[in-house]
Amino acid sequence: HDNDHHDNDRDNDHHDNDHDNDHHDNDHDNDHHDNDHDNDHHDNDHDNDHHDNDHDNDHHDNDHDNDHHDNDHDNDHHDNDHDNDHHDNDHHDNDYHDNDHDNDHHDNDHHDNDYHDNDHDNDHHDNDHHDNDYHDNDHDNDHHDNDHHDNDYHDNDHDNDHHDNDHHDNDYHDNDHDNDHHDNDHHDNDYHDNDHDNDHHDNDHHDND
């Protein structure tokens, strides 16, 4: 670790966090601008908020039970609350990931400067090649490998999930999914707002859409 702040503590939060790690008062599962159900940004009171979270894992407070952490970071902010989960957050450049998903598989590849708001249960996350991003991880039963992060903030509230967020350029992804498979590959400057249940999505090679 170089120039990063890690405070590993059971139940120890920053700015009164009242559930499981959300960004700006999220009232359910992560929506954008006051969508009170799944997947919102600003004013969400359920899972995954930043500022005013009273539960586990807030600002530089890692609350972990039986998890594996490999954090090789330079000047990044990591707020991880994990219980036995697997996370690979590698090489992210200027992106925001906040994903609200239940039992789905997401492959977001080749994104730079994108917004991802994911709140997941039972999925796998691989966030690779990101710099200057926001990652706030609240996980149960996962495995975390956070390697080679420079000035990034990761906010992920996950329970047993798998995520591949790789190489994204300037796109906005707000996906609220239950039991679906998403492949978002090679997106440049696009906006994706998908609310799906039990579906398969392949969004490949989109430029400015």
Image: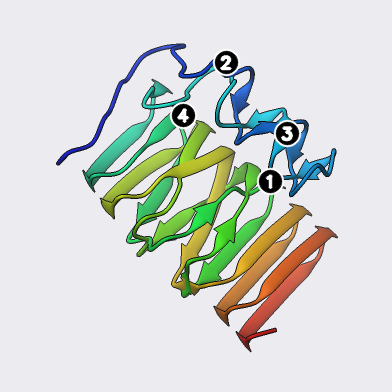
Residue at the left extreme of this rendering:
2
Mark 4 Cα shell of 10 Å, populated few (<14), some (14-19), many (≥20): many
Q: Earlier in the sequence, mark 2 or mark 1?
A: 2
Q: CA distance from mark 3 to mark 1?
A: 12 Å
> Could you say where residue 25 lies in the image, as x and y percent from the top left?
68, 30
Q: Earlier in the sequence, mark 1 or mark 4?
A: 4
Q: Which residue is mark 1?
A: 100
Q: Amino acid at mark 1?
A: Asp
Q: Which mark is residue 44?
A: 3
Q: Residue at x 76, y 54 (%)?
A: 177
Q: Which residue is mark 2?
A: 55
Q: Amino acid at mark 2?
A: His
Q: CA distance from mark 2 to mark 1?
A: 18 Å
Label 3 secondary element: strand
Q: Is residue 83 visible?
A: no
**47 or 94, nearer to the observer:** 94
> Could you say where residue 207 lies in the image, as x and y percent from the top left?
61, 88
